[in-house]
Every structure is written in C-alpha cells, then in structure tokens.
Image (cartoon, rainbow, N blue to C red):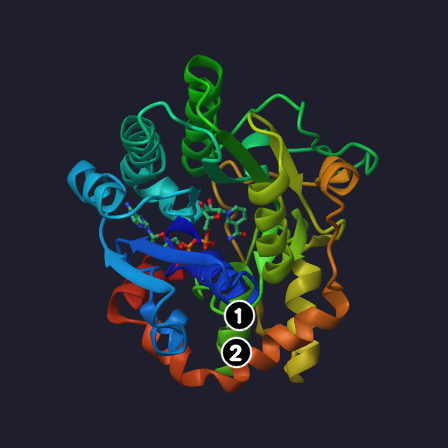
Amino acid sequence: MKTILVTGGAGFIGSNFIRLILDSEPDYFVINLDKLTYAGNLGNLLGIEEKYPKRYVFVHGDICDEMILTKIFTDHDIDFIVNFAAESHVDRSILQPNLFIETNVLGSANLLNVAKTTWKERFDSKRFLQVSTDEVYGTLPEDNPEIKFTESTPIQPHSPYSASKASADLLAQAYFDTFGFPVLITRCSNNYGPYQFPEKLIPLMINNAVNDKQLPVYGDGKNIRDWLYVQDHCEAILAVLQSGKLGDVYNIGGNNEIKNIDIVTMILDYLGKPHSLIKYVTDRLGHDRRYAIDASKIKNELDWEPKFQFSEQIGTTIDWYLSNTEWMENVISGEYQKYYDLMYSGR
Ligand SMILES: NC(=O)c1ccc[n+]([C@@H]2O[C@H](COP(=O)([O-])OP(=O)(O)OC[C@H]3O[C@@H](n4cnc5c(N)ncnc54)[C@H](O)[C@@H]3O)[C@@H](O)[C@H]2O)c1
C-alpha cells in the first residue's frame, strides 16, 4: 500500500485527482489535507468516505501549520505528496497579494521542510510533486503561434498569483539541488470541468448565462489560453508522480489555444442565449495576453497526451453544471457574492 498526502484535495483539481486515485489505484491510501477556504468544498467529494472507508481520510488543516503537518507525518508513513493547496485566482491575488504569499510560498516551504525533516533524509521511494502553472512563464506574443512555453523557458511571472507559484517552484527546485529532496514539478495550462469554483471563466460564464445575467469579459476578450480537461491534467500528474524524473519540470497542456471571447460565445450558443449578454469590462491589471504550452517532453518521456477534445468536453462540462444546480447554489455563498460585486459592479 502506498500512502499519498494530497493537499488542497477539496478544491477543483484536487478533488478530481482524489477520485482518479481512489478509482484507479487500489493500492493507494489517500490523506486529504485541506483548509477549506472559500474554494474548498467537501461537497466536491460527496460519497467518497462511504465508497472508500479504508482508503481515504480527510484532515481539516492548513499547510502553513507545522504542528498539523508533523502530526500527519507521525501518524502515517507517507510515500507521496501532491501539493495542490493554493490560493488560485489571479484576480484575488491583485486584491490580496499577501494571502497568496502565505499559502503558496510559505505554506509550500513549510510542507517541503516538514517532509524533509520527518523523512529523515531517507528519500528512497519518496516523491513530492508540486502542482504549478504555465502562468509562471509570463506571457507570449499573439502574432507568433509557433512560440510556446517549454520547460526551459525562463520564468517571468507577472501577477502576484504567478509570482507566488514561481517562488514555490524555485524553493522546490532548491530542495532538490541542495538536499537531493525528491521533487517533481508540473506546470499546466487552464483547466476546465466539473467542480470548478464559479469565479473562474467557464463556470462563471455558464452560471451567468443560465441566469440571464451579463457576462463580464475583460478588455477586448482576445486573451488566449490553452485549455485542458481536468481529468487529463489529473492523469498527467499521476504519470509524473509515478514515472517522472526527480528534479524535473513537466509542462502539461491541451494543445488547444482559444480566445476568451470565443469560449464565451461557445457557451452562449450551447445554451441558446443571446450574445447581447456579453459585457466588455475594464481589463484585469497586468493581464497576460497569451499562454501556450509545448507538452512534447511529457509525451516523449511518459507517453502522456490529452485524451479529451475541447469541442466535446465543453458541452459535457456545461451539462454537468446544468445538472448540478444544487452544488452551484451551495458554493455561491454570501462571501462569494460580495466578492463578485466587488470585482464586477461598476466596471
Ligand atoms: N485551475 C487551473 O486551471 C490550474 C491550472 C494550473 C495549475 N493549477 C494549480 O493547481 C492547484 C489547484 O488548483 P484549483 O483550481 O483546484 O484550485 P482551487 O482554488 O479550486 O482549490 C484550492 C484548494 O486548496 C485549499 N487551500 C487553500 N489554502 C490552503 C492552505 N493554506 N492549506 C490547505 N489547503 C488550502 C482550498 O481550500 C481548496 O480546496 C493550484 O496549486 C493551482 O495553482 C490550477
């Protein structure tokens, strides 16, 4: 039996990853450590404890809390760590950068340190995977589609969010270089799929369109992102965790660049709603123009490539949100509504 500590497992990608592990890896015991911030929701893992009573445990706690981490490491013989826990929304990082430094930088540092100490330098068969983002690389020109981020592209983050993620990547790499600590880093493009908090582009637009509310589009709407279905991302993380080369970075992408405005109109068309619901609003500060991932390393070394097509999965995703209105209502708490008003009213 392998014991895997998943941090941030009650969030969007973490909860999808825990489902994947429990369903596909019968020899894994999963510990989910999550602070349950506004973005963490145990409703994302409904039924998991009943389905896997002997292979799953939830611990409510903060990765910044050294005591709780030490207790988990003392109570369990941890083999693998996958660190999803993060403040993950760029807009919020513009409003509250310090929160991002606390969790994304100091929390990751704490996790590295406690793992290093309790593993007592015996790293054989241990693995620590830092889940990072393509945003650490900065932005790309729109007029040259041939240029993409590779693993050797220098990191050049622009937002407090991406700077905090880049800092954690550098710390993880420093632990590998200095201590031989068994680090792996993945850098993925934008994810979409079930259980994403509705502050992010796709669920936000679906929710507004369904409710005939305006769809706020930043700037000219022509910012380009590469989109990957969340299950593909989770399978890539598992492949890197199991077979990646220690100390290495792996880019993960969908080879699927789309302008934000095209996603918004796709959603409106799917739902049969008028384009007049689109409202262009003042652009995000420091808004990166284009991200694109060269994912040839993970394909060549680990034989991973995306299985899902955006043209099909966007419909599946919209249908999921349509049939999970109760989930949507539960996550749109008063706090989220206040934040929504702060971000978009009068813009
Ligand atoms: N969503 C994307 O498109 C995307 C793309 C690439 C990389 N990533 C990275 O993947 C990871 C997960 O992203 P997501 O979209 O699922 O985020 P999310 O915001 O949906 O979930 C984050 C989870 O972390 C938990 N958390 C926050 N602070 C914590 C702390 N101090 N201690 C313990 N738990 C804490 C939250 O409660 C939540 O459950 C992040 O590290 C993010 O940077 C996300």
Which residue carries the number 1 mark?
194
Local crowd size for mark 2, using a 10 Å CA cut-off: few (<14), some (14–19), many (≥20): many
Q: Quadrant for residue 163, please give it.
A: top left
Determine whether, in the image, residue 311 is placed left or right of residue 338: right
Amino acid type, label 2? Tyr
Q: In this view, does 172 lie to the left or right of 225?
A: left
Residue at x 30%, y 41% (from the top left corner):
96
Q: Which mark, by number, is residue 314?
A: none
Name the amino acid type tagged 1.
Pro
Q: Mark 2 points at which residue?
A: 321
Label 2 SS: helix
- Sequence-earlier tag: 2 or 1: 1
Q: In front: 24, or 290?
A: 24
Tag 2 and tag 1, C-beta contact below 8 Å: yes
Residue 197 point in image, percent of width and height: 43, 64
Count of numbered badges drawn on the protein: 2
Q: Report the residue at 33% width, 31% height from top.
A: 119
Label 2 to label 1, Cα distance in Å?
Answer: 7 Å
Residue at image coords 70%, 78%: 269
Q: Where is residue 235 in the image (x, y as percent from the top left)?
A: 62, 55
Asked if residue 315 lies left or right of residue 190, the reply is right
**Direction left: furthest residue:** 67
> Where the C terminus falls, by quadrant?
bottom left
